[in-house]
Image (spheres, grey):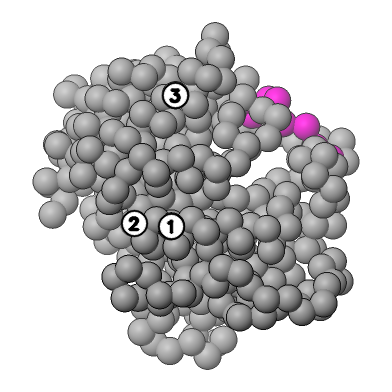
Amino acid sequence: MRIGTFVLAARFPGQGPGEALHRAVRSAEAAEESGLDSVWLAEHHFVPYGVCPSATTLAALLLGRTRRIRVGTAVSVLPNHHPVALGEQAALLHLTSGGRFSLGVGRGGPWVDLEVFGGGLDAYENGFPEALDLLLDWLREPRVAGRGARFGFREVAVVPRADELLTDGSAEGPEVIVACTSPKTVRLAASRALPMLLGMHCGDEEKAEMVALWRTAAREAGHPPEVVEGAAHVSAGVAQIADGPEDATETLVKTMPGWLRQGLGAHVTVDDRHRVMRDPVAYTELLCGLHPVGPPKLAADRLAATAERTGITRFALLVEGSGDLGATEENVRRLGADVLPLLT
């Protein structure tokens, strides 16, 4: 089982973006110090829900500050990026880190980002498959041409090649994962044999259904059994470790609703469609009930139960729910010191 952290650089009420970003960086450094497997970085624009606008840039910083831990994006929002530019960044980070970088991509939402970055609503609603395939070509082929409806360009050389020989003798490109929130995207990821990142709002039953759908679609696409059964999906969640059974929940219920109300409420849709926001308190309580929130034994049991029910053994856990730097570092330390030994 591989336990990692999920870093949003969340800006809680009364905080500035610099404080949120410093906490994000320190939590990632603490994750390596605590023996965790990975750090997954989110990308958001124009909202305090998360103040990291470039997951790849923050990944570059963290890869330079660490030596062992895997750093991934969860996710880079593909409609906001040219796939070739994102592919070049992924290859650069993969090669210079010795293969420690994972590229997570997703469709994002129908936000005003699409207007600002020029992708438009069509890039969100229809353009994801074309963009994903162009990105994969860039990470796997020596020369690539754009032949789609949105991206058209003459054949060019791929420099640097993502699958160039690494110092350990391997010659594979960076891992690519896809954030999946709908059956359509699950089937798309499966057809390309790409592992999924499943959201923290999903319970074990829903995640198990998505994994089953992925396996069916991957088999139908002709992928061999070892690829189908060996896909390393990632489950996102929330983690808060405390001694008492109610202490961790109390911490999050005090802090997370204010952040969620401020952060999610700031989203603006590109076409002014109405979006209903979850009730922040009810959502926080839901997350506390689904994920490793509580004493170490309870946290380990919930992670083990999710692994058993879904087959997923990789986790990206939000650890900054207290909104406090010291408490976040202690939370990460306890994940490594008190929870990990119960899972090995």
Q: Amino acid at mark 2?
A: Arg
Q: Amino acid at mark 3?
A: His
Mark 3 to mark 2: distance in Å?
26 Å
267 magenta-colored: yes
| Residue 280 seen | no
Q: Secondary structure at mark 2?
A: strand
| Mark 2 vs 1, N-terminal side | 1
Instruction: Look at the picture and state if 168 lies above or below 227.
Output: above
Q: Which mark is residue 22?
A: 3
- In percent of width and height, residue 193 lies at 51, 76
Q: Which residue is mark 2?
A: 314
Q: Residues within 10 Å of mark 3 (few under 14, many from 20)?
A: few
- In percent of width and height, residue 207 lies at 45, 58
Front residue of 283/47: it is: 47
Q: Secondary structure at mark 3?
A: helix
Dominant secondary structure (helix, strand or loop) of the stretch shown in magenta: loop
Mark 2 or mark 1: which is in front? 1
- In percent of width and height, residue 295 lies at 19, 31
Front residue of 259/203: it is: 259
**Quarter occupied by residue 226:** bottom left
Residues in magenta, as a range: 263-270
| Side of 158 where 148 appears, left or right | right
Instruction: Look at the picture and state if 209 lies above or below 17.
Output: below
Mark 3 or mark 1: which is in front? 1
Q: Which residue is mark 1?
A: 96
